[in-house]
Image (cartoon, grey):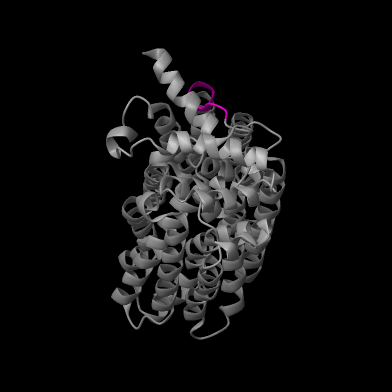
Amino acid sequence: MNTTRKLPKGVVYFFGALGGLLFGYDTGVISGAILFIQDQMNLGAWQQGWVVSAVLLGAVLGAAFIGPMSDKLGRRKLLLIAAVIFTLGALGSGLSPEFWTLIISRIVLGLAVGVASALIPTYLGELSQASKRGTVSGLFQLMVMTGILLAYITNYTFSFMVHGWRWMLGFAALPAIILFLGGLFLPESPRFLVRTGDLDAAKGVLAQIYDNDQAKVAQELHEIEGQAKLENKGFAELFGPTVRPALVIGIGLAIFQQVMGCNTVLYYAPTIFTDVGFGVSAALIAHIGIGIFNVIVTAVAIAIMDKVDRRTMLIVGAVGMGVSLFVMSFAMKFSGGSHTAAIVCVIALTVYIAFFSGTWGPVMWIMIGEVFPLNIRGLGTSFSSVINWAANAAVSLTFPYLLNLFGTGSLFIGYGVICIASVWFVAKYVFETRNRSLEEIETSLRARVAKAA
């Protein structure tokens, strides 16, 4: 622990969030790689679908079965395990000689993606001050967006090589190895250290977090000790009355983030660019432009994350996305496919992405790492991540069918209505967490249930 305490906080947060880059890269890179894989492996439509969605299957399994282990093994150890899984999955994918090896490797990658989604927001949240937790936890989403951008750039860079897809998929091993090496020097979460009885180590990490302000360290340590004594009752507590308000938030935000159509709009982006008149190569470059825009908007959102209430950001984001989708749907449905309408679609799509990347993208992950009590925080965030990945898979699988059934214009109206419905959910069920310590959030959660009883 002495080594880890000497690391600057910025370095700790960088390596702590680095798994998010792998999350984004491994989910984004397949969009370009599949164009070459299907040709060289002679894949049918069913096989292509499995190559693309295998990571989703692995993510559900990783979040469900490996994620909760953070409550037993610790956040840092599980981060190292995830780095090893990322490395094996990336190398296996890039070196795959045939279809089934590629599928298995992609599922292995998905396991790490699921672990990262369940673990990193919690880990970062537990390593930050209450007044800065939104910014620190939001680094995970910034890394996700950076990983997606890196995937777009890598896809374009290796698209001119005969076996470029192998480099596209295998490249993820490099940041995975860097994550493992950096993870060796990261501190453990002070909350986990208190739960395991290592108070001296916990005090050292808290001293780093609070810049050696011993009064704040003592206060935080006292609050953590009080809640660390509570027994972990697993799913019985997760589904019990005390945690129910937090569980409703975790499930609701996880589902709404996906059924608002974020992934389908991003998938449709290249088509809209070609409709405007871009060639395929130009569309890929424009896709990189979207990736850069995503990173910039996410960075701005993270900078203001601890200055604006989480609930306000969610409501404003949902309204902005809904209106953008209505405009895009109107242009597609009633314009007769004109050039002007295509330009309106591009503008509406860009505005939609800005609202998503600046609000629901990062806030959902931040809040699921905040709302659950310490003794089952790993289980709670893992369960919410499973729901999120399941919703992701459901939307991705149903999108082609719904597109054929309703057409693009009507389908995006449906997603827009869901955006507006999320405003009601946030207003009714989501409680504010900004500028409150994790212990304060847990205390108010337990007090609310006690008062109701």
Residue drawn at the location 43% of the way across and 39% of the way down:
228
Q: Where is residue 93 in the image (x, y as percent from the top left)?
A: 40, 75
Left or right of 360 on screen, residue 37 = left
Q: Percent position (x, y) of residue 48? A: 37, 67
| Magenta segment main secondary structure | helix
How many marks the image carries: the answer is: 0
Image position of 262 with respect to 284: above or below: above
State the quadrant of the N terminus.
bottom right
Q: Position of residue 182 (x, y in %)?
A: 56, 68
- Pick the front one: 395 or 124: 124
Residue 429 within the segment the image draws in magenta: yes
Residue 398 in magenta stretch:
no
Position of the C terminus, as image quadrant, is top left
Residue 227 appears in which quarter of the rendering? Answer: top left
Magenta region, residue range:
425-432
Quadrant of the image occupied by residue 436: top right
Q: Residue furthest bottom?
A: 162
**Closer to the camera in the image, 390 or 368:** 368
Indicate left or right for 68 with 294 as reference.
left
Q: Where is residue 378 in the image (x, y as percent from the top left)?
A: 41, 46
Q: Nearer the viewer, residue 186 or 252?
A: 186
* Residue 150 in sight: yes
Q: Can residue 373 be seen in this view?
A: no
